Image (tube, rainbow, N blue to C red):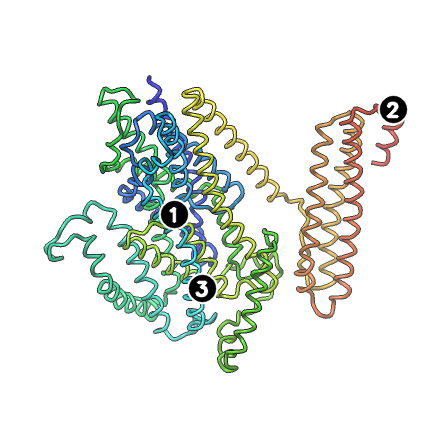
Amino acid sequence: MDIYLIMVIALGLLAIGDLVVGVSNDAVNFLNSALGSKALSVRNIMILASLGVAVGAVFSSGMMEVARKGIFNPDMFFFSEIMIIFMAVMITDILLLDFFNTLGMPTSTTVSIVFELLGAAVAVSLIKIFAGGEGVSELQEYINVTKATQIISGILLSVFIAFSVGAIVQYASRLLLSYNYEQKAKWVGSLFGGVALTSITYFILMKGIKGTAYAKESFDILNGSTIADFMENQVIAIALVCFIFLSIVSYLLISLLKINIYKIIIGVGTFSLALAFAGNDLVNFIGVPIAAWQSYEAWNISGLQASEFSMEVLATKVPTPTVLLFLAGMVMVVTLWISSKAKKVTKTEIDLARQQDTKERFSPNFLSRGLVRLSMNISKSTSKLIPHKTKNFIEVQFTKPKIKLSSSRSVDLPAFDMIRAAVNMMVAAILISIATSFKLPLSTTYVTFMVAMGTSLADRAWGSESAVYRVAGVLNVIGGWFFTAFIAFTACGTIAFLINLGGPTAIAILLFLALLLLARNYISHRKETAQIKNEDALSLAESSSIQGVIIESSNNVSKASKKIKNIFSKSINGLAMQDLKMLKKNKKAVKALSEEIDDLRNDLYYFIRNLDESTIRGASNFYINVLGSIEDITQSLQYISKITFKHINNNHNVLTFNQIRELKEIS
């Protein structure tokens, strides 16, 4: 078996892994609106998303050209060099996406694959240029500079457009419908349904039909034009007919069948975005391995040496076998149902968009504070220019229904209402459709995330108590996107250089290291999940009366006492048996307990705000004193665990039998 066949097989296996980690990250794009609004059951949401992914995967053949010739000029490379590029790309991609999944941060699989291809192609090109004694200026002959620049600029531009359009449409929708949208006249809901369903339906047609073989066939009924050309040339006519028809259908559904039209919009939107994701982003996971397999077939037939066979074949259009697309779709669907990392990434985005207060994950920074302060000053200035009557009308429309729940119980409520979820779907669908019709590249992750953040801002989800944390979260995610591009380019270029230098040995070592890193991330994620599910974790008091606070505090004291006794006993036993490993684990246990108490202290504001007016002084004083006592004991434990670990770690004298016995008596 030759080395290149082994590389193709390895790339195939990496493709399966890349599908798993890629779907885990990209699932947030089409699940966040439906899951956040709780418009449908989780089971129904997953079924709709699975159908969308399966259909979109089969229609994605045309997008595979990006991996073949979108970033570099294949005719400038030989088969041996192309295989180095492809291997470097897949190793980098699977590690990079898994890293973001472990952090629970959404990133763009499109950006990662584009910059990986660019990094590896630049590295191999420079090796060729320097080996041939040419100048760096020759690099433009190897890289498809125009296409690469178009892709990168289109992706960056989509961030600002998506955020702005999402905010404007959500603000207008809320002014029109308010939070009492279900009590509005039926024609209002039917018009909104007509607009939303038209945008989503056209989006499905653009992404679905245009991906089929029939799209380029001409029909007499269309005056001899192809379906693709007809859809591009008759946008207004198609949209108008769809709007009238779907508005009537929406009215009939609302009036006769008493169906909630917003649930229909969210369900259809979930299907359409899942279809677009599979159609657009499948190339990010399997485009490179398929291109490698097709390259291997062409080289194998040629009979030439790998270092002599030019890769012009990649410049031609070669259809991807439907069976491979179907199998890839099935892997994506299975991952969608079983991936816990997908749930973690989705939670990050939903929490950033949540209407209610929640435990904020991100810490504020100087940039988020500055932006919030600037926004508040602008808001105060513009508020003076708005007539008093208009301001009152706006306030009424944006008044949220009051539901008194504790901060921890509020997570059981939908993160946002169905209007915001429908707007998220509608705006994302329109923007992606426009980009597709004008053949402009964009990142579905960037569009869906920034639309969701724009609608959150317009919907006043970022109040004075949460804005600085939410803005910090958005900045962290955007910073992660730039980090993705930088790391993808540099890491992939470095790996390509190492493979070129070390050959098969370097490939084997890199694959082994990749496997180790994936295993480590998996184990780390499992441990983190287990900690979250820990039943002995301390919990914030949720009662509003003094009696309830006493009962709940006694539970915390009981749990804390159990942990304190366990930690102290292990400190003494570890010291007695000179068990460094036990003492090291004990230090981590004390740190975890201290962090739990810090979390309770950080949530004191929500606890006090939830108390009845008559019991605020007594209940809050009691609860704060209980927390203070547990904190004092924990600080003492931290000191004990630190000095016992230090004693054994520094190989100090073993304690005598009597010393150990006395310590055990007090433990």
Q: Is residue 394 above or below residue 621?
A: below
Total residue callouts? 3
| Kind of residue indicated by mark 2 | Thr
| Kind of residue indicated by mark 1 | Ile
Left or right of residue 530: residue 642? right
* Quadrant of the frame with the N terminus: top left
Q: Residues within 10 Å of mark 3 (few under 14, many from 20)?
A: many
Find numbered disc 1 in the image and state the secondary structure of the residue it sits on.
helix
Which of 159 and 526 lies nearest the eye of the viewer? 159
CA distance for labels 1 and 3: 24 Å
CA distance for labels 2 and 1: 69 Å
Q: Mark 3 = which residue?
A: 167
Q: Mark 1 = which residue?
A: 152
Numbered badge on residue 335: none
Left or right of residue 322: residue 107? right
Q: Position of residue 426 (x, y in %)?
A: 37, 60
Identify which residue is drawn at 49% across, 78% down: 393
Q: Residues within 10 Å of mark 2 (few under 14, many from 20)?
A: few
Which numbered disc, 2 or 1, marks the residue closer to the eye? 1
Numbered badge on residue 656: 2
Residue extending farthest to the top is 1
Identify the mark nearer the N-term, 2 or 3.
Answer: 3
Find numbered disc 2 in the image and state the secondary structure of the residue it sits on.
loop
| Kind of residue indicated by mark 3 | Ala
Q: Is residue 216 above or below residue 639?
A: below
Identify the mark nearer the N-term, 1 or 3.
Answer: 1
Identify which residue is drawn at 29% across, 36% down: 73
